[in-house]
Image (spheres, rainbow, N blue to C red):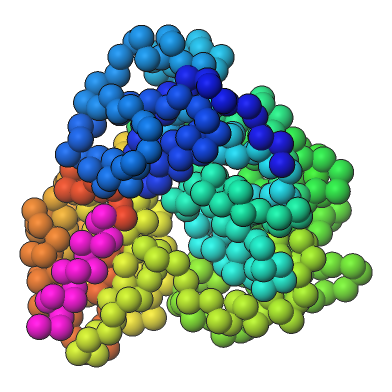
Amino acid sequence: MLRPDFKGRKALVMGLGLHGGGLETARFLIRADADVTCTDLRDENHLKQSIEALRGLDIRFVLGEHRLKDFDEADIIVKNPAVPSDSPWIAGRDNIETDISLFLKSTDAPILAVTGTKGKSTVVTALHNIVKKHHPGARLGGNITVSPLSFLEQLKPNDPVVLELSSWQLADLRGLGILRPKVACITNLMCDHQDRYENFEDYEADKLVLLENLGTGDFAVFPNGADGRKWAGNCKAEPVLVADGESAAEGQPTGYRTARLGEDGRGWLDIDGKVECILPETLRVPGKVFRQNMLFASVMARLWGCDAAAIRQAQEEFVGVSYRMEMFLEAGGIQFYDDTAATTPDAAAAAVRAMNRPVVLIAGGTDKELDFAPFESIASVPKFVVLLEGSATNAIRTILENGNAELSGPYKSMENAVEAAVSHAEPGDAVLLSPGAASFGMFRHEFERGDVFKDACRRVALF
């Protein structure tokens, strides 16, 4: 293990956060004998849970503000991925790290890495589920809300690490030369985070940092479409193009290894001069988008060296990922699905189309300066739509009303929204939270939104 020396050095953790990255960074630096200060613009009340988790450690907290002297005196500043690199507190400094960069500088573990606008959490979770059967020491971390610093010390030589990486996390790694996955994957590229980026090209450029250090002997997995073929043509690793049914019908590209979904839903990969079935016909979560994500995971696992039969068995058993098309409750003949991670209109539209039963949709939230046109394509699909309060909701409502959708809201509480949804659902229906917008305003983050939704459903449907 190649750990940098932090003994006695002043370390500033910028952005303690709520998802564990700041916590694990602070713990890592304490274990490395650094002198640690945590600073966050949010106050103690907002960060109560994170502060409690660090109780007993020799850490100074500066909350509700940042102080310039803390930044000037720090030998190392570890920022939260949500902090942009042009923040006036860190712009121009050459001592900036993240939990991901600290991890990559501290290990030589083989990395399997995934990014993309949507689907990456499902892909990495399914991939880890497969790989750990082949290699029990395999670990999962990154944007999936598990900092890899939390398991750094437990890694043994050659234990593979599956990383989900967001565009922000990748941007922080640009030019450092420390990220070189053995197998990399970009699931897709859709319009997202345009409140953070000046244009779509800048967003794509951050995603492509994933490919920056790939070389001979590595693999890069892309969707078989215009974007994927472009990336494949500029990639130094061996590319593999993964087709869904529609792109497969357009014909297989020459010169590249390919994978595809068959008409029966099974997935196939060209490998070692033959075509292997690596995805079974029967999966536990409905929808074409989920099946496509499972094919990405299967392809990555097979390229890593897992057996095709073992991959199929693992995929048959996989139950999906929390907060992403998660069927968590069935009551009175109604199924309840939590898809709170669908924070873009494209993701919400895909979730509605994936349902194999009549659906009552709960949507709406905070605007990320996205185009809500994808709601046009599904306006007539739900039997009823319930809207949550938020800056994006008026635009969503207008599109749905123009499509003659029946709807109510916006509601200021999830409890009232769930009550309205259940009142319009019948046995055989599904109640689906797939907001198509961010959660800020009503909730701290999308995972809190999902948890509140689940609790409300259980109260309303079971009592």
Image quadrant holding the C terminus, namely bottom left
Q: In the picture provided, is 433 more to the left or to the right than 5? A: left
Residue 10 percent across, percent down from the top left: 47, 19
Q: Is residue 214 magenta?
A: no
Q: Which residues are magenta?
A: 448-463
Q: Tell me if residue 153 comes above or below residue 331 in the rendering.
A: above
Which of these two is toward me, 391 or 307? 307
Instruction: Answer whether residue 455 is magenta in the image.
Output: yes
Residue 457, percent across and down?
19, 73
User: In the image, is 89 to the left or to the right of 408?
Assistant: right
Q: Nearer the viewer, residue 64 or 117?
A: 64
Residue sitting at 66 percent across and 63 percent down?
137
* Residue farthest to the right, as pictured: 273
Quick check: 248 above or below 18?
below
Q: Residue at x 79, y 66 (%)?
A: 305
| Most common SS among magenta residues | helix
Q: Is residue 324 visible?
A: yes
Where's the N terminus, which quadrant? Answer: top right
In the image, taking residue 153 as reference, residue 143 lies left or right, namely left
Snapshot quadrant of residue 336: bottom left
**Image point (45%, 67%), residue name:** 321
Q: How many marks?
A: 0
Nearest to the observer: residue 197 or residue 319: 319
**Spot occupied by residue 7 in the image (x, y as percentages of width and height):** 57, 25
Residue shown at the point (84%, 67%) measured from the top left: 271
Residue 197 visible in this rendered orientation of the protein:
no
Across and down, in percent, residue 440 comes to 23, 43
Q: Is residue 355 above or below residue 439?
A: below
User: In the displayed structure, would residue 355 be above or below residue 252?
Assistant: below
For residue 135, what is the image quadrant? bottom right
